[in-house]
Every structure is written in C-alpha cells, then in structure tokens.
C-alpha cells in the first residue's frame, strides 16, 4: 500500500504523467464506466411489439378473406352466413332491381335488425322470432310486416308454430320509406325465403294509412289487416253484411278507425 502511494506521489503511477499529482484514469473512471449514447434509428425493436404486429397482420388478412365481398365495389357482406347474391345481369346489362334492393337492405338489416334476429335470420329461441321461413315475412304482400317495422310489435305472437312474447321497437322515425322497402325486400329474399320485393311507394301508403297510430301493434290487430291491398280489416268488402263489417272494424285500434272515418268522402 505504501509502495503504491510512493509511486503515485513520485509521478510513476500508470495514470500519472511525470510531475503530475492527480491520477487521470481515476479522475475519468466514472465517465469511462458510462455506456455510449444510443444512435437514433438503430434501436432494436421490442419483441412484444414484433409479436403484436404479426398478430395484427394475420387478423387483417383473415378478416379480408372472410369479409371482402369478393373485393367488389358494389358489395356489402358484413357476414358470410348470408352473403348478398351478386347482381343478375339482364339482357341490357342492367342490374336486377331485387338484388340491388337486397344489397341496400343488407346494410339496414345489419345495423337495426341483426342484433335481435341474428345474421342467419333464425332469431333467438324464446326471445326473438325467426325471419327465415316466417309466415309473417313470406305473406303475399307487405301490409302486415311493414306495419311491424313502422310501429313495432308487442305481446304474444306465434311464428313457425312457436310462441314468443317480447316487444319489437318502432322504426318509423328512424328509417325512411326506401330503407324500409329495402330491408323488407332483403329479408323476404334471404335464408331461403322467396317473396316479392317491396317498394317505397307501398311503404309510403301504409305509413300514411297508419299515421294516427302511436303504439305498437298486437298480433291480433295485424291478423285483421289483409296481407296485401288496402289497410281495411281483412275480408271487408261489399259482400259483407253490416254486422260483419262492424265486427271487423272493432278489431282495429280506435286511432285507425278514426283515420278511416275521416278519410271517407263527405
């Protein structure tokens, strides 16, 4: 120990130049222990970040594979369970109007109807009735089903032999006549359903006929409405007796009876 001190003091230490009293190496030891400053742009990537990016790329590729709609600019296919059929080209190259309506209706269905009736149109057992194969959907005309979309449906109803008792929301303030016509055309031609298209003109007429009705329909009320044609009670014609007409009218809600009376010529 004393020898080291003697060497340092006499200027013979490894960190001293001749005549110096301070060890330069010892003075800069703290600086020498520090790592060099990192150079921007050359830092290694975090392993978890690499894994996350890989998973993200894999998911994106899978999503595009299943929901690309064939990469068609005019195709909306959020789910492959019931993809919208491609347009049918007519003799003049025009797109089939039913297919065109179905595409627009698929967007409306996914947004407003799918949460309850499901993407496959089978609904939820004991909660929401199916649309696939439903006698309400496949009726000859849209008189009843359009009323359900406009004002909603409340209370017990039988669909495909099963009983349901829930409430469907009214969409008359959320959807216009064209959107309702499109979504009805879509559900009437999906999941194996095959029925006529619904036009915005038909929906507009039904909306006008039921303008005075504020509450949801009951199944019994709808059964009194013909599946197509005017909105009067089922079977109401010139061949009916006054008693039969009265009985049919009594099945209608008071608001519709009032609107019907007011529409009669003075």
Image (cartoon, grey):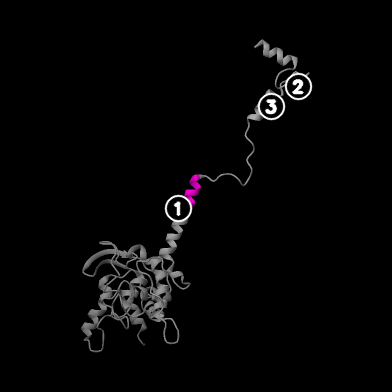
Q: Label 1, label 2: how many angstroms apart (C-alpha)?
A: 61 Å
Q: With respect to residue 91, does 134 lie above or below?
A: above
Please identify the quadrant where the N terminus is shown. top right
164 sits left or right of 110 in the view: left
Circle 1 SS class: helix
Q: Is residue 50 magenta?
A: yes
Q: Position of residue 178 (x, y in %)?
A: 43, 76
Marked residue nearer the N-terminal end (3 or 2):
2
* Magenta-drawn segment: 47-56
Which residue is tagged 1?
A: 55
- Which residue is at 42% across, 64% downward? 65
Q: Label 3, label 2: how many angstroms apart (C-alpha)?
A: 15 Å
Quarter where residue 11 is shown: top right
Which residue is tagged 3?
A: 28
46 sits left or right of 181 in the view: right
Residue sitting farthest toward the right: 19
Q: Label 1, label 3: how many angstroms apart (C-alpha)?
A: 48 Å
Which residue is tagged 2?
A: 17
Q: Position of residue 213 (x, y in %)?
A: 35, 73
Residue sitting farthest toward the top: 2
Q: Is residue 1 magenta?
A: no
């Amino acid at each position: 120990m004393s020898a080291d001190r003697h060497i340092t003091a006499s200027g013979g230490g490894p960190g001293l130049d001749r005549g110096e009293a301070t060890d330069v190496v010892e003075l800069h030891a703290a600086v020498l222990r520090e790592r060099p400053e990192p150079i921007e742009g050359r830092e290694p990537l975090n392993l978890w970040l690499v894994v996350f990016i890989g998973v993200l790329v894999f998911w994106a590729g899978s999503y595009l594979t299943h929901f690309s709609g064939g990469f068609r600019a005019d195709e909306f296919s959020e789910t492959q369970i019931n993809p919208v059929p491609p347009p049918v080209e007519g003799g003049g190259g025009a797109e089939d109007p039913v297919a065109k309506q179905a595409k627009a209706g698929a967007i409306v269905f996914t947004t407003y109807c799918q949460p309850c009736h499901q993407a496959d149109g089978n609904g939820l057992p004991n909660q929401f009735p199916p649309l696939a194969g439903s006698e309400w959907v496949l009726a000859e005309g849209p008189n009843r089903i359009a009323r359900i979309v406009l004002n909603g449906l409340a209370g017990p109803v039988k669909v495909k032999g099963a009983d349901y008792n829930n409430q469907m929301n009214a969409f008359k303030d959320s959807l216009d006549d064209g959107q309702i016509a499109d979504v009805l055309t879509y559900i009437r031609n999906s999941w194996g359903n095959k029925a006529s298209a619904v036009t915005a003109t038909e929906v507009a007429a039904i909306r006008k006929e039921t303008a005075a009705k504020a509450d949801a329909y009951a199944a019994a009320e709808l059964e009194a409405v013909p599946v197509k044609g005017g909105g009067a009670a089922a079977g109401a014609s010139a061949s009916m007796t006054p008693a039969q007409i009265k009985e049919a009218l009594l099945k209608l809600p008071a608001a519709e009876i009032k609107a019907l009376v007011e529409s009669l010529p003075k």
